Image (cartoon, coloured by chain):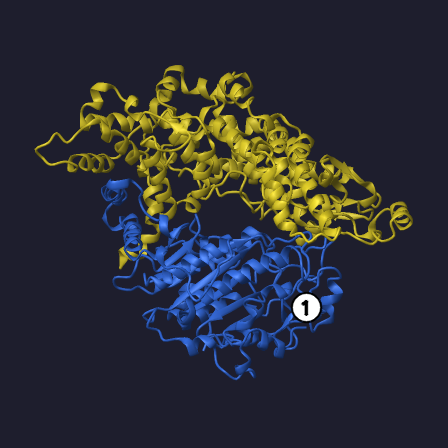
């Protein structure tokens, strides 16, 4: 096992051994570079990542009993607290746990019983588990609830070709696949053509409703002026050449360009490991390495700016505690979330651990949920972005700060 | 404040707004509606032709694609070698070189040579001639789909292939599925599009592509549930493997949730697990060795009793259990409703009227799942022709790209660049990873980034700068109209949309023309026609169908 001592040696942080120091980003923060603008970055792991092999309860025998071929061996986890350990593929982000800037929430999820990817993602993104009629996404409602004068059209951005459910709605989020290509490409007449498109969409319906196209063209103009693309990775950060790496690199550019970004969202797929999942090595290990390296590069790239950034990961549900007949796992229930950044009270695995004994499992097969994902997001939205109207963000849910896990300071 | 709050949904409203009128559609509107919904939009002159021949005649022809010759497209597709190959031929030609390269690299490593296996593999791959590279297979498949969508005369057939492939989605990125999709579309989807649903369902269930995509090829009975004889045999012949393997729920869940009953179709987790047991042993020959055929492996089938959806199977059953469940699922009322809903959503409206869905579901049940009759029930319905559903659906990227190329009368020299555009717009062909496939709803496709991608596509296309497509938009309108700015806009609007553009759009485009030059100059010349065409193809009107 990689113990604390060798870890600190290898990460060059021997001086701070003992874990008494606060979140590394709080120490680094000087706020000058982000103008104090707070940003929340959410990453959705689509396909249901196997949380039990991400943050491994290596202290629990039942984990090894349930997974004869795909458990991550005790000796290979990066120990976190003597009971949980990170998958070795998380080696690039695990140091932030020791730095107290990365927190883990385990046995967290959406309480609806569905094991359908589609429904579970839909419920998590709408923020209303079990209610299919909700039209908008909860991050959109969070942005909309914070009306601001002269708000930037780039307050909420999704990296990807489609606007995800979670940002659909009155929040006015912008989806873009490539920051540098967000604009009209018509050579010398681009501006004129843009104006024409703008007015076609603005005039298509009566006054009050016209504006979205205008806003998106405004966003394009801001991006053109700020030219975030020229902002190359700093601090020697090297992003892995994969979708998540490219998305996070562009989110970092938007943050550095001070375009008023408050919520950034991106997703990464490939977690639906029904067969040949692997343990310390293999399919999931490879995906996790790409995932971890992209997040680590983002963190390194932003440097002291991370003091104003919180990054959170989510996935629609967890996977079965027992491995299936194909050395994989089927659809389960509770999962794990990672929270990284400034203000995070890291170095701790939050949430009540329900255990993996047969009697403790949800429907005798899955990790039970002890923390509702809405409690995690309520806290992040309130403390990081100052969202006050949490009841409108999570309608029908008893939002209460008493249920917050205290992940943020 | 109000404007801000509403802003996010505005785009959608702009695009799906329609003129609420209870007037009946004119014959011209009926023709355009049919061409938009039952085809990938009109080509130049199509609306006039369909009006002249009769809308109902055209529809009747489209419902029997086997009687439409389509020789040009057939001849063109005949030049694509992989489209005729069987799974095994494709595996032999395109997969084997990779396997051999892998083997060599491994052997070199085992022989103690200091080799970087990855680098060596990459090098060996480079040495494969381009026509033998594995990506060729999906590339040709994407090309044929685009060629057919743009140029085939069997347009409704292509619409239904798109629909059913998406319904039984298989992702090309899953394991070796990139080699199996050619046969999957050609031999599993296409032959059944106008047949019985049960046959289509059965064909997908036994297709190598689906068996791999949803992992059923691997799903086997837990060792203790296998037939006694098989257990003894395994213990004697391969004791190491005798206790390996077990259930995989992936296919059992998705066949009920997505392919048949629908997520609210009334099944439980227990049903999922039990159905997975029913499908154990539904497997493949040896795809990794270049042989991919369906095979039932009785020794790996769960020999115990099972109960699925209240139907009991006593111990000792075999493949007939799965076939019986497919029969039951195919004829289940929840399936009829689910299929009817999705067809109506595709052909009529994102939120289809429940009365229509119920009627179509009834036709599905009454005709033993006859898909031609079911589709006909949608088209024959009064709802299909209601003015409120005219122009009420937003095109998916695939529909947008195909319809834009058709509208300008574009000649498709090379479809590959169009496939890349689809990727940028978020709908790469054969590239939907989740079993859900792509969304049929406007909200999934309409956002600012995607709209910009469409506008840029329109600009390139109309300016004849889209690689692989050539078109002359000036030729679309009479010379007399082209000589005049206002007449050009009006004529292009009719030529490209087949119908009307709003006054607002027309005014915007006209003012764009007159602004361009100093007032003393004649503001109009032919070189502006491509920009006008791009603005029309990028207009809210052209996003709808």
Looking at the picture, tell me which residue is in the foreground, B283 or B135. Answer: B135
- Res. A136 image quadrant: bottom left
Q: Quadrant of the N terminus of chain A?
A: bottom right
Question: What residue does disc 1 label?
Answer: A76
Looking at the picture, tell me which residue is in the foreground, A156 or B83. Answer: B83
Q: Secondary structure at mark 1?
A: helix
**Image coordinates for residue B382, horizontal then vertical, percent:** 43, 29
Q: Which chain is blue?
A: A
Looking at the picture, tell me which residue is in the foreground, B503 or B82. Answer: B82
| Rendered view: A397 above or below B250 | below
Could you tell me how many numbered marks the image carries?
Answer: 1
Q: Residue at x 73, y 46 (%)?
A: B218
**Image coordinates for residue B539, horizontal then vertical, percent:** 30, 37
Looking at the image, can residue B83 be seen?
A: yes
**Image coordinates for residue B210, horizontal then vertical, percent:** 65, 40
Parent chain of label 1: A
Q: Colour of chain B?
A: yellow
Q: Residue at x 54, y 36 (%)?
A: B340
- Res. B164 image quadrant: top right
Q: Residue at x 81, y 48 (%)?
A: B305
Looking at the image, can residue A193 be seen?
A: no
């Amino acid at each position: 096992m990689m113990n604390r001592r060798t870890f600190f040696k290898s990460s060059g942080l021997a001086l701070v051994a003992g874990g008494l120091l606060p979140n590394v980003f709080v120490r680094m923060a000087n706020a000058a570079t982000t103008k104090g603008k707070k940003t929340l970055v959410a990453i959705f792991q689509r396909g249901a990542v196997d949380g039990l092999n991400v943050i491994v309860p290596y202290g629990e025998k039942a984990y090894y009993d349930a997974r004869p071929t795909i458990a991550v061996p005790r000796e290979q986890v990066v120990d976190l607290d003597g009971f949980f350990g990170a998958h070795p593929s998380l080696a690039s982000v695990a140091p932030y746990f020791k730095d107290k800037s990365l927190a883990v929430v385990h046995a967290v999820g959406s309480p609806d019983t569905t094991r359908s990817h589609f429904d579970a993602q839909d419920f998590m993104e709408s923020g209303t588990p079990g209610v299919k009629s909700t039209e908008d996404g909860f991050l959109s409602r969070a942005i909309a609830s914070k009306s601001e004068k002269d708000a930037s059209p780039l307050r909420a951005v999704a990296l990807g070709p489609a606007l995800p459910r979670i940002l659909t709605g009155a929040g006015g989020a912008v989806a873009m696949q490539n920051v540098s290509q967000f604009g009209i490409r018509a050579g010398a007449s681009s501006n004129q053509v843009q104006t024409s498109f703008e007015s076609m969409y603005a005039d298509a319906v009566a006054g009050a409703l016209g504006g979205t196209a205008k806003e998106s063209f405004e966003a394009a103009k801001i991006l053109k002026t700020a030219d975030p693309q020229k902002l190359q990775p700093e601090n020697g950060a090297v992003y892995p050449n994969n979708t998540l790496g490219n998305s996070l690199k562009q989110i970092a550019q938007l943050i550095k360009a001070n375009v008023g970004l408050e919520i950034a969202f991106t997703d990464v797929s490939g977690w639906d490991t029904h067969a040949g999942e692997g343990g310390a090595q293999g399919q999931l290990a490879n995906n996790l390495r790409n995932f971890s390296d992209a997040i680590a590069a983002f963190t390194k790239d932003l440097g002291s700016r991370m003091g104003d950034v919180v990054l959170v990961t989510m996935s629609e549900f967890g996977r079965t505690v027992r491995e299936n007949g194909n050395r994989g796992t089927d659809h389960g229930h509770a999962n794990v979330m990672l929270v990284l950044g400034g203000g995070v009270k890291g170095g701790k695995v939050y949430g009540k651990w329900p255990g993996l004994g047969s009697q403790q499992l949800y429907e005798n097969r899955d990790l039970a949920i002890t923390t509702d994902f809405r409690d995690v997001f309520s806290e992040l939205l309130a403390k990081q972005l100052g969202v006050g109207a949490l009841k409108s963000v999570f309608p029908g849910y008893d939002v209460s700060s008493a249920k917050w896990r205290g992940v943020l300071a | 404040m109000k404007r801000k709050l509403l802003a996010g949904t505005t785009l959608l409203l702009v695009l799906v707004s329609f003129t609420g009128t209870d007037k009946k559609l004119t014959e011209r509107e009926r023709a355009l509606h049919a061409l938009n919904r039952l085809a990938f939009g009109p080509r130049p002159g199509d609306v006039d032709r369909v009006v002249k021949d009769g809308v109902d005649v055209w529809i009747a022809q489209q419902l029997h694609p086997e009687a439409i010759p389509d020789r040009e497209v057939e001849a063109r597709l005949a030049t694509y070698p992989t489209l005729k190959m069987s799974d095994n031929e494709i595996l032999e030609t395109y997969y084997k070189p990779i396997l051999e390269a892998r083997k060599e690299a491994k052997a070199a490593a085992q022989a103690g040579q200091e080799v970087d296996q990855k680098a060596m593999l990459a090098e060996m791959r480079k040495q494969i001639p381009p026509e033998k590279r594995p990506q060729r297979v999906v590339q040709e498949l994407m090309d044929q789909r685009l060629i057919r969508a743009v140029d085939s005369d069997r347009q409704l057939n292509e619409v239904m292939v798109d629909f059913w492939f998406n319904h039984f989605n298989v992702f090309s990125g899953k394991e070796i599925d990139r080699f199996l999709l050619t046969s999957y579309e050609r031999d599993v989807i296409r032959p059944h599009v106008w047949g019985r649903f049960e046959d289509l369902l059965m064909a997908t269930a036994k297709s190598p592509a689906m068996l791999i995509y949803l992992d059923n090829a691997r799903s086997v009975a837990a060792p203790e549930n296998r037939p006694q004889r098989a257990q003894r045999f395994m213990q004697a012949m391969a004791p190491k493997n005798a206790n390996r393997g077990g259930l995989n729920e992936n296919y059992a869940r998705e066949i009920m949730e997505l392919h048949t009953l629908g997520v609210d179709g009334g099944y439980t987790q227990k049903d999922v697990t039990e159905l997975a047991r029913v499908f154990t042993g539904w497997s493949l020959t040896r795809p990794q060795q270049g042989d991919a055929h369906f095979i039932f492996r009785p020794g790996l089938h769960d020999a115990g009793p099972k109960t699925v959806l209240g139907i009991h199977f006593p111990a000792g059953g075999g493949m007939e259990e799965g076939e019986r469940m497919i029969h039951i699922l195919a004829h289940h009322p929840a399936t009829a409703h689910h299929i009817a809903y999705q067809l109506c959503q595709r052909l009529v409206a994102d939120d289809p009227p429940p009365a229509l869905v119920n009627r179509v579901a009834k036709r599905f049940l009454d005709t033993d799942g006859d898909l031609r009759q079911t589709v006909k029930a949608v088209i024959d319905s009064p709802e299909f022709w209601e003015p409120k559903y005219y122009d009420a659906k937003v095109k998916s990227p695939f529909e947008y790209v195909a319809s834009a190329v058709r509208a300008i009368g574009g000649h498709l020299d090379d479809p590959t660049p169009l496939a890349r555009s689809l990727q940028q717009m978020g709908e790469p062909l054969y590239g939907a990873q989740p079993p859900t496939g792509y969304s049929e709803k406007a909200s999934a496709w309409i956002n600012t980034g995607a709209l910009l991608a469409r506008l840029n596509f329109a600009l390139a296309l109309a300016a004849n700068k889209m690689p692989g497509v050539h078109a002359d938009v000036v030729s679309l309108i009479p010379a007399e109209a082209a000589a005049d700015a206002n007449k050009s806009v009006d004529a292009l609007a009719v030529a490209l949309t087949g119908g009307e553009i709003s006054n607002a759009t027309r005014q915007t485009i006209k003012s764009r023309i007159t602004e361009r030059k100093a007032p003393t100059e004649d503001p109009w010349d032919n070189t502006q026609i491509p920009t006008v065409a791009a603005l029309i193809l990028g207009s809210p009107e052209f996003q709808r169908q």
